[in-house]
Amino acid sequence: MQRRSVPLIAAILLGLFIIGCAHAPINAPLSRYQPNAGYRFANLTPGDNTDSLFVVLTFSGGGTRAASLSYGVLKALSETTITWQGKTKRLLDEVDLISTISGGSFTGAYYALFGDWTFDEFESRFLKRDIEGELTGELWNPVTLIRLASPSFDRIDLAAELYDRTIFEDKTYEALVSRPRRPFLVISATNMSLGERFDFTQDRFDQLGSDLSSYPVARAVAASSAFPILLSPITLENHPSPPGYEQPDWVKNALGDYNLNRRRYLQDKEWMVYHDKTDHPYVHLLDGGLADNIGLRYVTDSIRDADRPGGIRQLINQVKIDTLVVIIVNARTEPSEPIDKKARAPGVARVAMKTATVTMDNYSFETIELIKDIAVAREQAQRSVRDCRQLLAERCPAAAPPPELKEMKFYVIEVNFENIADPKEREEFLSLPTSFKLDPAVVDRLIQKGGDLLRQSPEFKDLLKELH
């Protein structure tokens, strides 16, 4: 053998070794089904947080733009002092649930893991970094190119490693389980085959026969922000059901509801797909915005369905919530579109992008209108019951009154660039790109604007009148 061949052979062997070792983390199987353990809303202690004032935050997709806007809202909540049940505290201390999508998942996950350290670290850790540039640099690293030759390692795994190492400090969901306090974090992605929302909660992982506590938070965030084509899907293994696992009663009930509640029936029919381990041994996840780009569907489902995991409807039915607040941080943009100025049809890339984003925007609008309708319906129901009881008391005092419906105040507050008063400034924000690289000065403006838009909201002002 010629001596000069030795380095070549060594390089080939090293490359094969790297390829063999290149394997993304696999979600671990669940050794035993424990419905009262794991990362579930019911397992979190309120602490100083009260059920009577129940605050929900939803953070939309939109890259660093969305992460910055939602961070600005978090800062504003931390600076807002309230008085509730005789105690003075920050409004942020009453946040019970954070539901996040894509870019908003970085902010929500960081706050859930690190609490108030977020206000010291998050800007430098994520918002003011060139994440896109760093990913590109990692991509062209010779070792990375070899690793990408492995069928078990793809671009999204590279991104998840970067997030894990430089943002989330290698934290898994065990960090949230071992410190069981609110807010409950729901990071959502999209099941590629079903087109439905996939939530990173133990309730969902039970279906996969998997233990969420050992799963890296960074990989959940990566799945939530895996925009098609630009990034590959994240893959989960659908393990056999663990000993003791039974189909929840609420799923059994819903599967018999086709003619009574088709929405619920179809949702739970999709839920049952995960129990078909033969035809669905793997689950491939894409950007959560494809199913719900504002993180609000988890909340509407939780409010409407009494027997679903999530807690909100159960607490309402148990007469524990006096005031329900849903703050929607919607970083939607509306950049000028030049395609109508040309006779030539748009190319494949432009068509693909418009197909995805137009659908997301339309669905987001309808979802926001849905939760507003839910709030109005609750108010109307309370008024009807109150009027009926009063009428019976006046005209037929001997008659048994209908059951009392607890008076619950319901605030829906949306932070949206459309609410910027100045037309020129509004156009500037609505034209911001969706990327993981923004000029630090733009990030600062987004943070400030998030707080300003929240404080200027008429619904938020009404809420503060109640809380002072």
Image (tube, rainbow, N blue to C red):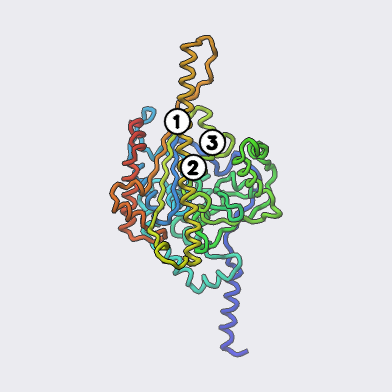
Question: CA separation, marks 2 and 3?
Answer: 18 Å
Question: CA separation, marks 3 and 1?
Answer: 18 Å
Mark 3, residue position:
304
Q: Residue at x 50, y 53 (%)?
A: 359
How dense is the environment of label 2, judged by Cα within 10 Å: few (below 14), some, or many (20 and up)? many
Mark 1, residue position:
52
* Image location (x, y in percent) of residue 294: 46, 48
- Work out whether residue 171 can be spotted: no
Q: Secondary structure at mark 1?
A: loop
Query: Which of marks 1 and 3 precedes in the sequence?
Result: 1
- Residue nearest the observer in this picture, 446 or 353: 353
Q: Secondary structure at mark 3?
A: helix
Q: Residue at x 47, y 56 (%)?
A: 357
Question: CA separation, marks 1 and 2?
Answer: 16 Å
Q: Is residue 400 above or below residue 77?
A: above
Amino acid identity at mark 3: Arg
Asked if the residues shown at circle 3 and circle 1 are in contact, with their CB atoms under 8 angstroms apart, the answer is: no
Which of the 4 image quadrants contains residue 340? bottom left
**Residue 412 vs residue 241: left or right?**
left
* Image location (x, y in percent) of residue 227: 50, 59
Q: Quadrant of the N terminus?
A: bottom right
Q: Quadrant of the C terminus?
A: top left
Q: Secondary structure at mark 2?
A: strand
Looking at the rendered image, the disc whose residue lies closer to the viewer, 2 or 3, is: 3
- Work out whether residue 206 can be spotted: yes
Q: Residue at x 42, y 60 (%)?
A: 435
Asked if the residues shown at circle 2 and circle 3 are in contact, with their CB atoms under 8 angstroms apart, the answer is: no
Farthest residue in the bottom direction? 2
Mark 2, residue position:
184
Q: Is residue 16 above or below residue 430?
A: below
Which of the 4 image quadrants contains residue 79? top left
Amino acid identity at mark 1: Ser
